[in-house]
Amino acid sequence: MKGFSNRFTDFPDYIIGITREIWEDRGIATLHDYYAKDIPVRSPSGVTIGNESVIAATMATLAEFPDRQLLGEDVIWSGTPETGMLSSHRILSTATHATDGLYGPATGRKLTYRIIADCHANGNQINDEWLIRDQTAIVRQLGWDPKDFARDLITREGGPEHASQPLTSATDTKGPYLGRGNDNEWGERLADILSRIMNADMAAIPNSYDRAAHLEFPGHVTGHGHSDADKFWMGLRAAFPTAKFEINHQIGRADPTMPPRAAIRWSLTGKHDGWGSFGAPTHADVHVMGITHAEFGTFGAAEPTLRREWTLIDDTAIWKQILLATG
């Protein structure tokens, strides 16, 4: 790869390799090289600027979860080494809550949760990032309700006036990557499914999902088939029925030895004005950052359907926005 270290065979190898080097091999100092000095990192909990913030957050996480593993499940990517590449990296993480930290007093509990990180890399360095960690899964496995965790976090941060602000359209910042992905047919297919669902065409699920579709949703919730897909997406959209849905980035790929697959980063921006997954309407302004990965296939001559899906949002960040708005 032009501009990248020759120890990496391709872009997925680069992404998976530096992730292991940083976290599991304790090469935290390599973030000075692998991450740009002024990199913006956006997550549902907020925006940070600079690799020093990334280093501090990495050390804090490893102090609280010292045996954390990051198992790379997939890297769905677009671009070229000459122009820069965007990876959507899906990770299954295991860890033990061994030390007091952000998530409270140590519990000794074993955790399993996912992360999806969209990273833009150019010249052997990551300079722009969007990250969703399944906070819902983490806090539930530690005995918290996501709403209660968000409320407690606001208190620990000094109350509503001093609490850090979750990611919104107002707090977001532009970075060096301005691309939108690619126009591969599998990305187009997933974009169409999500757009139909968000436009209240819930028939998109039985029409486009396999009856045995395997589903992974926030909270480390595993589902199967049409009814479980309908339950998640209906509950989310019903909570924010008038919010604006936007596809922010779209990738499709068809690689040898892999099923056709896609990665979509999307958002919902608007009012919490419906009964759904977040309780009674509060009319709070809410921004939902989401990432969905999907794999497609067919058993024969039939039209391909969505056979596996992984979607992440952060319930704790949504609850934090609601609580900050309503007191």
Image: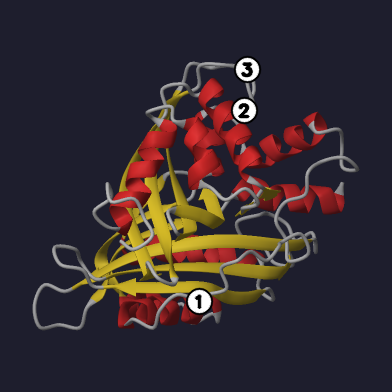
Residue labelled with disc 3: 105
Quadrant of res 89? bottom left
Which of the numbered marks, if any, corresponds to residue 103?
A: 2
Front in this rendered view, residue 17 or 140: 17
The x and y percentages for residue 160 are 87, 42
Judged by depth in the image, the label closer to the viewer, 1 or 2, is 1
Q: Earlier in the sequence, mark 3 or mark 1?
A: 3
Secondary structure type for disc 2: loop
Q: Is residue 317 above or below residue 60?
A: below
Q: Quadrant of the N terminus?
A: bottom left
Looking at the image, which residue is at 34% across and 63% down? 2
Provide residue 136's location: percent of width, then percent of height.
55, 43
The amino acid at mark 2 is Tyr
Residue that appears at 53% across and 47% down: 35
Q: Which of 137/164 is in front?
A: 164
Q: Residue at x 15, y 82 (%)?
A: 302
**In the displayed structure, does residue 262 sit left or right of residue 178?**
left
Q: Amino acid at mark 3?
A: Pro
- The disc labelled 1 sits on which kind of residue? Arg
Alpha carbon separation for disc pair 2 and 3 = 7 Å
| Dot 1 or dot 2, earlier in sequence | 2
* Distance in Å between CA atoms under marks 3 and 1: 41 Å
By what rule are the colours in the image chosen?
A: secondary structure
- Give the label on residue 243, or none: none
The residue that label 1 is drawn on is: 180
Query: How many numbered marks, from 0 up?
Result: 3
Query: Residue shown at 21%/68% (left/top)?
Result: 255
